[in-house]
Image (cartoon, helix red, strand yellow):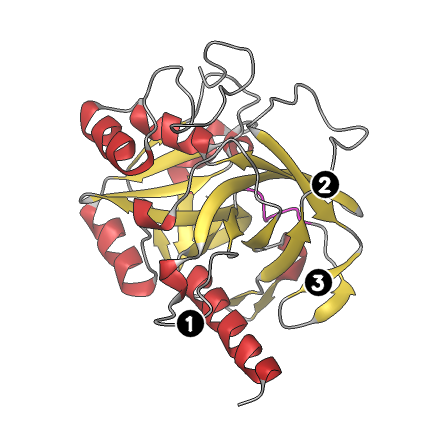
Amino acid sequence: MEVGEELMKRVDAVRGFILKSTVPIMVEIEDNKPVPVGTGNLLRINDRHFIVTAAHLFMDNPSHLEHVAIPDSRQTSGYTRILNMQYTRPRNQHVDVAVMEIIHPDSVSALKDNWNFLTLDNVRVSVNPPGGGWLVGFPRSEYDVDGKTMIFKPITVMTALLPSVPKGAEQPVLEGLDWFYEYSRIADVVGKSFTTTPNLEGASGAAFWDVSGQPEQGFWAPEGFAKIVGVQSSSMHGAYMRVKSWWAVARTLAKLDDELAKAVFDKLGVAPGPTSAQAGTTELGEQADPIG
């Protein structure tokens, strides 16, 4: 097999692994008529189940949290209502991450049947941004309906870290929390090469992945090296995408209760108090507790 073919097979395998846990988030505003509002990723800690996303999806209409639904696949007429959840976000409104714990066993069971829940083994936490990564999400412009079938077309963008905070980025920008990556109108999109990019509205809440750690030899599997490192918060089409370090998600989880605090600390080294993201890194900004 030629090098190019082998590389494409690896790229497809990584993308397939990521898409198993990347879900469109919908709101059933009218009965049997859910509409997409963002993207999330499924996470399991011990025997508890979560959707990690961006907090701003529900900021204007908190009542929509009572009507969240997840489609059964990327092309389907069925969906799972999240019948009961605990929604948590940092008190600091600038820390645009949120955690939804799925409580109802029927909702958990249905999501397990159709999707894959990641674990903390699939996460890496740092205040230092990787030099590049993948954004995998569901832009609203790529959503379509054919009769009763909902069609979600994901986008996978390969991007690189910007050398400085872009002009016009909303303040405050917290060092170690806010990362900025290229999002040009022409970008490297997996499956399409360099092509015109869509507006990222609808991809908010999607995970940002570091896939740089793949081994050159030996056993090769995406789940062994592909790591979530952030959550996409906002973007300026033709300029940049803004990513929140997964440090903020880890802190949010750790603050929920003692069980999650222990799991997050044991696996990621993140404590619920105002500590550094992990041993050997610098403190996150100058504030004692920017997460709140």
Inter-mark Cα distance, 3 to 1: 26 Å
Rendered location of residue 73, percent (x, y): 42, 65
- Tag 2 residue: 162
Furthest-top residue in this view: 288
Of the numbered discs in the image, which one, if any, rests on residue 187? Answer: none
Task: Work out whether mark 1 precedes mark 2 in sequence or the reverse, and give the earlier one.
Answer: 2
Q: Magenta span covers which residues?
A: 200-204
Dominant SS of magenta comes to: loop
Task: Work out whether mark 3 precedes mark 1 in sequence or the reverse, and give the earlier one.
Answer: 3
Relative to residue 52, is residue 58 drawn left or right? right
Task: Work out whether mark 3 precedes mark 2 in sequence or the reverse, and give the earlier one.
Answer: 2
Q: Residues within 10 Å of mark 1 (few under 14, many from 20)?
A: few
Inter-mark Cα distance, 1 to 2: 31 Å
- Tag 1 residue: 217
Q: Residues within 10 Å of mark 3 (few under 14, many from 20)?
A: some
Where, quadrant-wise, is the C terminus in this rendering?
Answer: top left
Could you tell me which residue is drawn at 50 percent across and 22 percent down?
282
Q: In which image quadrant can residue 52 be found?
A: top left
Secondary structure of the residue carrying numbered label 2: loop
Q: In which image quadrant can residue 226 be found?
A: bottom left
| Depth order, front residue of 150/191 | 191
Under mark 1, the amino acid is Gln
Secondary structure of the residue carrying numbered label 1: loop
Under mark 3, the amino acid is Asp
- Tag 3 residue: 188
Could you tell me which residue is drawn at 42 percent across and 49 percent down?
41
Viewer-nearest of labels 1 and 2? 1
Furthest-bottom residue in this view: 1
Secondary structure of the residue carrying numbered label 3: strand
